[in-house]
Image (cartoon, rainbow, N blue to C red):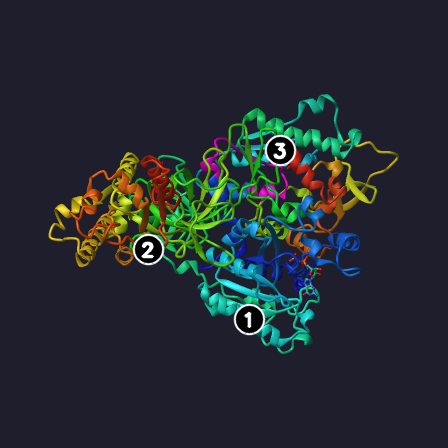
Amino acid sequence: MSHKSDLIAEDINAYLKAHETKSLLRFITCGSVDDGKSTLIGRLLYESKMVFEDQLAALESDSQKVGTQGEGLDFALLVDGLAAEREQGITIDVAYRFFSTEGRKYIVADTPGHEQYTRNMATGASTADLAILMIDARKGVLTQTRRHSYIVNLLGVQNLVLAINKMDLVDYSEERYDEIVAEYKTFATEIGISDDRITPIPMSALVGDNITEKTDALSWYEGGTLMEHLETVRLSENKNTKPFRMPVQWVNRPNLDFRGFSGQVASGTLNVGDEIRALPSGKTSKVESIVFPVKIDGEDKLDQAVADQSVTITLEDEIDISRGDIICGKDHPAEAADQFRSTLLWMDEDEMLPGRTYLMKIGAKTVQATVAAPKHVVDINSLEKLAAPTLTLNAIGSCNLALDQNIAFDAYEDNRTTGGFILIDRMTNRTVALGFIEYALRRASNIHWQAMEVDEVARAEQKGQRPAVLWFTGLSGSGKSTIANALEKRLFAMGRHTMTLDGDNVRHGLNRDLGFTEADRVENIRRVSEVSQLMVEAGLITLVSFISPFRSERDMARERIGDGKFLEIFVDTPLSVAEDRDVKGLYKKARAGEIKNFTGIDSPYEAPENPEITINTVDQTPDEAAEIIVKYLTQRGFLSDWVI
Amino acid sequence: MTRLTHLQRLEAEAIHIMREVAAEAEKPVMLYSVGKDSAVMLHLAQKAFYPSKPPFPLMHVDTTWKFGEMIAFRDEMAKKLDMELIVHINQEGVEQGIGPFSHGSALHTDVMKTQGLKQALDKYGFDAAFGGARRDEEKSRAKERIFSFRSEQHRWDPKNQRPEPWSIYNTRIQPGESIRVFPLSNWTELDIWQYIHLENIPIVPLYFAAPRPVVEREGTLIMVDDDRMPLDGETPVEKMVRFRTLGCYPLTGAVESSAATLPDIIQEMLLTTQSERQGRVIDHDSTASMEKKKQEGYF
Ligand SMILES: Nc1nc2c(ncn2[C@@H]2O[C@H](COP(=O)(O)OP(=O)(O)O)[C@@H](O)[C@H]2O)c(=O)[nH]1
């Protein structure tokens, strides 16, 4: 394994000295089959002389047998994996490769690019400082490129290399290169990747242009080679400058005189004498010592602990800290909460069950977490947000989580270690999801320095539901009130917080000054919309049962309350049926001219064009109708929040 | 110090892994094979729990054909560190007289090492066992997880391994199942040697060149470590040799060398053109061999 350095032969001690200070760079390669990913990695290994002669001999013979390069070396064969995959000629899963150069040691996470391997790519990206996005110059920016970018960005990978490969097949065209770069940057901006995070490099992995050496073929390209970039890229995410965080893994108690807290520093630095705050308890103390046996039988203390270091901390005061707690700098502590909005990437064959309790492991803490139905899922090809009742394998969605206790955390964008978690199925023990904390829905009450806003979200979360207005419209006698009544009973039995506004009742009180002229009808609905809106703000599921014959008024109500919270339920009963039923004897009176402006008789009813739900009362009983509505609400996630 | 070097990062990662196991496993054990990787692992365990002692015993599955110097070194280390050492020998194998010369390398390894390990884990009920394997050792290892799950029958199912995002490990298992944990997964052979050098970690003297009696068989230099070695008219010759990996002496090839210090060894490794596994007789069958062994429960 001949590293390129002459120092090895001449002065091994000098070489070793120089290599002791190497840094570590972890990167991930993303590309689809045949973009040249394996060829690229194989070449990096080969060029950095990480390939031994016996491996090279095997490579030569394999290249003849199964290679795609005729007589030439097929570098891709250096990096293939398990026997079964090898036969199929594709790589799956995440494979880790290693090489080192003069300046750095590299750990490469090699993952396949197909959509069905989204979870593998996410896993590989979770520890990466940099991602290489492979693009075939002939094909340009494809859907998969967008998908890969979305995933690595979601996982918080800061540096992106746009490896525009196979330049030899497009005549090393600068124009083509510029075109691809421009297209990519436009897209990247859309998903929140700024230009300064992107380094495009034109290359041919097969021929070897711009991998470790610049070649004449790409003389128009002024930047450095891929290897130069890897060697010099600044690891921008400087964890040391962030607030101090150390999840406690293990309480170190060899005897009664020593009580230390062992963990790996997630971010920041800590000095002896610094003030700390332990979370979620909020208790404070001072650092007495930082224990680390620098040499066995020798120096065993440090003045300072830095990010990524595994140390043991002792404190001046005896405060209660256990595994899973986080030791923070006193003045910039993490937050503590037990309910979160988070993004989940589903990793299991079995789909997510909203309302089910999973185990959540975050840092060294394992708690129980109940997941609500997704607020939305992201179509990772179009990047559109869609409604979905659950998360299936590889789906990415936004969900609320309710925990059985407070935990300390940061938002994932601020800290990968204290904001990233996994969900574990309690029965199968499988790791079923990757999660990213976005923000807390409800802050822990014992954490006094967090001011709590009591707003619609807070009230709703307190009730554990998503407030909405269920607006029943239909002719008099169509069955609105009966169905609303049946539905409210069900919701109540399910522990929901509800309120019903019924036309007749409201007209006896709030609206008793209103008649049935068109103007009064409009005012009637306006007031009811306003009241419904207040009910929603109070966090209630509000059932409104009003004839509300005019489309424009109902649209006004929809606008006031907001799409998504306003569900129009059309109780579709033909006039003849309603008139036949005539429970209150009103139709008879209207026909007799005793009631003026009666809907359906001498005043029009404008049926909804796109109601969320239509109920046919001719074929359905009120209970069946209520059942349909409950199902609808459950599927859209109005009810499944927090149900255990 | 503001930025950790790559070795410090690897060290911190390995310590993190060990602490997770100590905190979550019910009955962990460290498989101690006496080689250089085990030496590093043991050293890291001292650091991880300091000033406590590592909260688990060491276990050596002795095939009865290890180099004599390895056994002496093993016992000395355990005594020096004051750690419990469990030595397990597959008695059935011994009774059947299984050995590499009489039964061939494959059968010997299977019975004395693979089966021996399973027996030992079952006997003591260990639910997590640290091993010193590295991903850079062999292509199929590149995909091995750090936490590798085994069924009650100790089988490894490549399709059913858990994702390991960030540094979060799901260590939950059903009764009877167990985990192999590889804290050195991300280390390369060079990292191991550099770390041994930097940290001054004691290793078996067999790694250093010395005059040793060897015979040449099918191009491999085998050291005559004791008188169980059948000599077929051969006369052992003294050669300056050393070993890059250590195992059963009849299955471990020596290399001619004059490297007597760690820098010499590292220099030789950096300039050599042969991979480390070249010296292991057991590997020569096929590329997929490791994978098969792993599925069968071999480490
Ligand atoms: N002409 C040309 N072919 C390439 C280049 N890079 C890779 N290839 C070829 O593209 C095919 C797929 O490459 P491979 O590395 O296996 O792709 P992977 O599926 O992304 O790992 C192979 O036939 C490679 O030889 C390149 O830069 N130029």
Q: Quadrant of ligand 1?
A: bottom right
Q: Is residue A87 left or right of residue A13?
A: right
Q: Nearer the viewer, mark 1 or mark 3?
A: 1
What amino acid is labelled 2 in the image?
A: Asp
Q: Is residue A350 left or right of residue B285?
A: left
Q: Chain of mark 3?
A: B
Residue at the limit of the structure toward the left, as seen here: A513
Secondary element at image label 1: helix
Q: Which range is magenta?
A: B21-41
Count all numbered tags in the image, as a single digit.
Answer: 3
The foreground one among A222 and A485 is A485
Q: Are marks 1 and 3 on the same chain?
A: no
Residue A181 has which mark?
A: 1
Q: Position of residue B85 (x, y in %)?
A: 56, 31
Relative vertical location of residue A63 with respect to residue A619 in this rendering, above or below: below
Mark 2 surroundings within 10 Å by alpha-carbon count, few (fewer than 14), some (14 through 19), many (20 or more):
few
Relative vertical location of residue B134 with respect to residue A146 in this rendering, above or below: above
Residue on which disc 2 sits: A563
Q: Nearer the viewer, mark 2 or mark 1?
A: 2
CA–CA distance in space, label 1 to label 3: 48 Å
Secondary element at image label 2: loop
Residue on which disc 3 sits: B155
Q: Is residue B25 magenta?
A: yes
Q: Chain of mark 1?
A: A
Q: Position of residue B211 (x, y in %)?
A: 75, 44
